Amino acid sequence: MERQQNIHNKSYGLSIVIPMYNEASNLRPLVLEIGETFKSHRIYKDNLEIIIIDDGSSDNTLEEARSLLKNLPILKVIRHKTRYGQSAALYTGISNAKFDTIVTMDGDGQNDPKDIPKLIKEYIKYKELGSKIMIIGKRVYRKDKLSRKLASLVANTIRNLLLKDSTPDVGCGLKVFSKELFLNFPYFDHMHRFISTLAIHLNAEVISIPVHHRPRLSGKTKYRTFSRMLEGIVDLFGVWWLLSRYNLPQVKEIIPKNEA
């Protein structure tokens, strides 16, 4: 019991990374909801940042983000010169994160910020045991169209067979992992679809936790279901080829050891 209390009282810095493309109407309510969620979590009072990556939006996403900066010092806004895609936005945000514990979530408001503390609690438990860990949300009662659900099912089935990754919901944007783990992944376009596979390849344990899924706060999805499914299947074979050749060297010993 004493050890469990220590886990929850220990101060962990937390960087919440949110890629956005033309999500002006969703940005403010989502960021404020995150802030409200963490008001009662004192351990993050001075160790929390929210990073918005504006991936070359053509609407007022940047202006909405800037309007929050004065009254929300935990907010950091990064703007891409043009649209590079979700994987690039994640890489930019995580590379510029202040803290090692990373939470990612989608910018459309479908992920519920109230689920974040639950995922972090599980993440910290494994980290304290010395495990290399990634926590991924598993969306319960998805609020998506049937066509999108079917496309995900097809892509996931092929991925599981080819890449030996049985993670039930890799498409859930709500994830918790370390910055160090992520920066050891090989970077490529659409890599965000294979984060769990990359983590498993680096001997990390991937655990799925049930989370809520909500209708979009506002606006429409930026992706076409059929083309997204085809891209995902093509990428599967590319990732299979890449991982068959990707092998980081394991250091056995450093002599003399660097003293902190």
Image: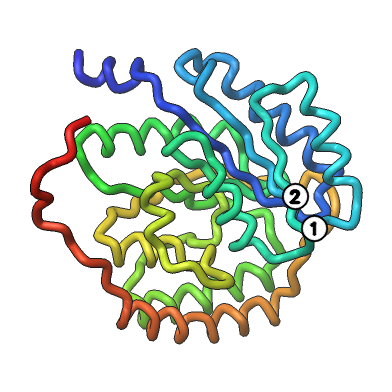
Q: Is residue 215 visible?
A: no
User: How crowded is the residue under tag 2: few (<14 C-alpha within 10 Å), some, or many (20+)?
Assistant: some
Q: Quadrant of the C terminus?
A: top left
Residue 52 vertical position relative to residue 181 in the rendered view, above or below = above
| Residue occupied by mark 2 | 79
Farthest-out residue, right:
59
User: How crowded is the residue under tag 1: few (<14 C-alpha within 10 Å), some, or many (20+)?
Assistant: some
| Residue occupied by mark 1 | 56
Number of callouts in the render? Answer: 2
Compare residues 196 and 243 and report the one nearer the observer: 243
Compare residues 227 and 190 and report the one nearer the observer: 190
**Res 250 quadrant in image:** bottom left
Residue 164 vertical position relative to residue 176 in the rendered view, above or below = below
Residue 144 location (% of width, % of height):
69, 60
Identify the residue shown where x is 81% and y is 49%: 23
Q: Which comes sooner in the sequence, label 2 or label 1?
A: 1
Q: Amino acid at mark 2?
A: Arg
Q: Amino acid at mark 1?
A: Gly
Identify the residue shown where x is 60% and y is 74%: 150
Q: Quadrant of the N terminus?
A: top left
Which element type, helix, strand or loop, lies under badge 1? loop
Identify the residue shown where x is 47% and y is 73%: 156
Question: Pointers 2 and 1 in contact (CB under 8 A)?
Answer: yes
Which element type, helix, strand or loop, lies under badge 2? strand
Judge left or right: residue 247 versus residue 230. left
Residue 249 location (% of width, % of height):
22, 66
* Colouring method of the image: rainbow
**Res 64 quadrant in image:** top right
Instruction: Give the spatial CA distance, label 2 vs label 1.
Output: 7 Å
Residue 250 vertical position relative to residue 96 in the rendered view, above or below = below
